[in-house]
Image: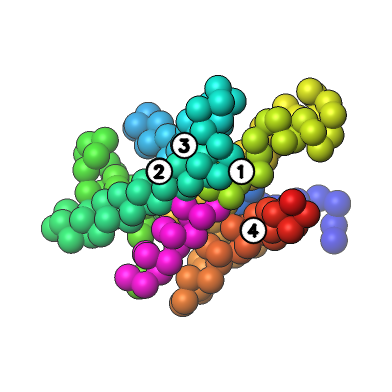
Amino acid sequence: MSPDVPLLNDYKQDFFLKRFPQTVLGGPRFKLGYCAPPYIYVNQIILFLMPWVWGGVGTFLYQLGILKDYYTAALSGGLMLFTAFVIQFTSLYAKNKSATVERILTTDILAEEDEHEFTSCAGAETVKFLIPGKKYIANTVFHSVLAGLACGLGTWYLLPNRITLLYGSTGGTALLFFFGWMTLCIGEYSLIVNTATETATFQTQDTYEITPLMRPLYIFFFVSVDLAHR
């Protein structure tokens, strides 16, 4: 390759800078390549952090001694299950609306493949952009149940006093708690909100929606090792 030839041309570089953060974070599109309303980013942040919020509620009650660990897991998992069903049925409702997402005409399909116009924070076009929804009703139920189960077991796994007993270090507990919940949020977002497309793939061909299960599968693997140990 000639030293004057760039590894990525301008089109591919723009595409990579958009797609790579989306792949790493499990689906949120925080870099769109065009000017989107602020509520698009705010809604994605709220949806991304929702598992942490419900897990935090359970963890807080456990730390106060109000709930046992298994009740904590059940509470957080139940709240996440309810949230997952709300998210999925909101997406179904938006699909049934007559409004459609209007694409902006563009000749740069690599950098601008998801450019849209939005009319309101909770409009049908906004919901369909943020939550594309599932192809099959069975997956709507199955993925929602998995989301609740992952949040419940993840909350149990990441209870601070259990981590402290494992590592005996406040710093280690804080790091594992933070990155553990980031991992859970990534897995949950990919499962019930919007599945991340891998950076090297322009458009996914996932007919049976297997890709959303991969990140939660890794989470279940690590949690199952901890449960088996206990």
Asked whether the beta carbons under mark 3 and mark 1 sit within 8 Å of each other, the answer is no
Say whether disc 3 or disc 2 marks the residue closer to the N-terminus: 3
Residue at (48, 46) in percent of width and height: 74
Write down the residue under mark 4: 220
**Crowdedness near tag 2: few (<14), some (14–19) or many (≥20) residues, C-alpha within 10 Å:** many
Q: Nearer the viewer, residue 64 or 108?
A: 64
Report how far apart the C-alphas of labels 2 and 1 lie in the structure: 14 Å
Report how far apart the C-alphas of labels 3 and 2 lie in the structure: 6 Å
Asked whether the beta carbons under mark 3 and mark 2 sit within 8 Å of each other, the answer is yes
Residue at (45, 42) in percent of width and height: 75
Residue at (72, 27) in percent of width and height: 174
Q: Which residues are magenta?
A: 137-150
| Three-letter residue code for mark 3 | Trp
User: Which mark lies nearer to you, 3 or 1?
Assistant: 1
Q: Secondary structure at mark 3?
A: helix
Write down the residue under mark 2: 79
| Three-letter residue code for mark 4 | Phe
Write down the residue under mark 3: 54
